[in-house]
Image (cartoon, grey):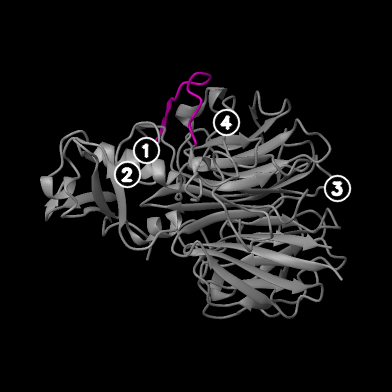
Amino acid sequence: MSKVRVLVGTRKGAFILSADGKRDKWDVSGPFFAGWEVYHMKGSPVNPDRIYVSQTSGWFGQIIQVSDDGGKTWTAPGGGMQKSPQGFPMGESNRFVYDTAAAPLTTHQWYDGTQHPWEFKRVWHIEPSLTDAEGVYAGVEDAAIFHSKDGAHSWRELPGLRGHGTGPKWQPGAGGMCLHTIVLDPKDPNRIYIAISAAGAFRTDDGGKTWKPINKGLRSQFLPDQDSEVGHCVHHIAMSPSRPGVLFMQKHWDVLRSDNAGDNWREVSGNLPTDFGFVIDVHSHEPETIYVVPIKSDSEHFPLEGKLQVWRSKSGGNEWEAMTNGLPQKDCYVNVLRDAMSVDKLDDCGIYFGTTGGQVYCSPNGGDTWRPIVHDLPPVLSVEVQTLA
Amino acid sequence: MSAAPIRIELPFHLRNLAQVSGEVCLEVSPPVTISSILDALESRYPVLRGTIRDHDTQQRRAFLRFFACQEDLSHQSPDAPLPDEVASGKEPFLIIGAIAGGID
């Protein structure tokens, strides 16, 4: 029978939630890396027991951890997967150095509109290769994309993104100037989509050498030119692997879709009660079925009227319905952050999301009904699901 | 002069990361300075590289402080000799997480 493994990154460590295909009885393990912020953890689609973790701390900076046994044991791998001569773990995997030879560091726009130095802070998102368990990408703050070919032992920036030349117009969102979304095209290994708050979405068609902004159709009231080429606060992008040219976006405000790989976008917010939010995802088997969690506004990051609702569209947007069965419908004032929703690949597609109140919810039936797997974790930063044979 | 046994106290999270408990004792060749202690520490425990000072600039991370002998040594030159009590192993060299760091 198939199983699912839910990888949960939180403000105070990582947790792994496991169940069989019924998804009604759960084992909870963790906290791993207790006391550290785990922005993201994700398994390799090639080798599901290979899991990459971004472990970070305001005191001690960035650590990358890797497991090769599904999360039972972990190593900070740099310098080889072996230990030092004295038997202690090596740790060069936490070294992220901008490639200033290829793309000199510019400044970026600061909150107050002045220019500010570009500085590495942390890894927000890890995206393992679709074809190579040793390959993995990392999206970082201040915004850049890094690639490792050796299982996260060492990292090299893909400097063409920063080298696009619009960096001085990029600015931090509330969480910092982060590259938080990396979407790999399963049919074209040279095509990668990324998103940055607040710069917008970019695409490469040559494996990361050159990038172009893909923000036509996005409008942002906080920009002096609302249709600007860059500067938009994209919160998340989702894609069905079965239809890579179609993208769905949750922007700061607005839910949008693109049917031509991001070249043009159109708003599909339709009847949503508010189109502010962070997460968006696509059903594993129905590429026109998409999910968002509407949040009241950019000033009030909690659900409307204290009612936690997932809204589902079966028509690729515009026509939405509220999924409420099993979710709190009063006095709920949590948020659902951008990397905190995921879907499994079981026949009856499971939908998962985590909240800043420490709950992780599962719907084993495409959103019709929901149950909390756990209720009292630290604030949830990310949720990823692995479907295991 | 022979190398002195230096005592180093790490904060909780770095002890876990390096898989040690209690004080760390290292042989450090004189002159004993902040730089020479951190060089020896990172050589013995490579996982700590980048967690106390920047990989490349060698600047102390902003939310860490260095104390010894009831003094805050965070802002002295990393190449200045440390007190004899540290160099002789009588007093530990303390690496402390600032009270303003961490998460609620």
Say the numbered circle drawn on residue A242.
Answer: 3
Please say if A112 is above or below A345.
above
The picture places residue A169, in percent across and down from the top left corner, at 47, 30
> Disc 4 or disc 3, which is closer to the eye?
4
The part of the chain drawn in magenta is A96-112
Please say if A158 is above or below A341.
above
> Disc 1 or disc 3, which is closer to the eye?
1
Q: Are marks 2 and 1 in contact (CB under 8 Å)?
A: yes
Q: Is residue A294 visible?
A: no
Tell me the CA gap for discs 4 and 1. 17 Å
Say which quarter of the image contains residue A286.
bottom right
Q: Quadrant of the C terminus of chain A?
A: bottom right
Please say if A114 is above or below A343.
above
- In the picture of the structure, the residue carrying the numbered disc 2 is B61
Say which quarter of the image contains residue B101.
bottom left
Q: What residue is shown at x 54% (from left), y 38% (from top)?
A: A79
Residue A38 lies left or right of residue A317; in this view the side is: left
Kind of residue at badge 2: Arg
Q: Are marks 4 and 1 in contact (CB under 8 Å)?
A: no
The front one of A31 and A240 is A31
Kind of residue at badge 4: Arg
Say which quarter of the image contains residue A218.
top right
Say the numbered circle drawn on residue B54.
Answer: 1
Q: What residue is shown at x 78% (from left), y 62% (from top)?
A: A387
Kind of residue at badge 3: Ser
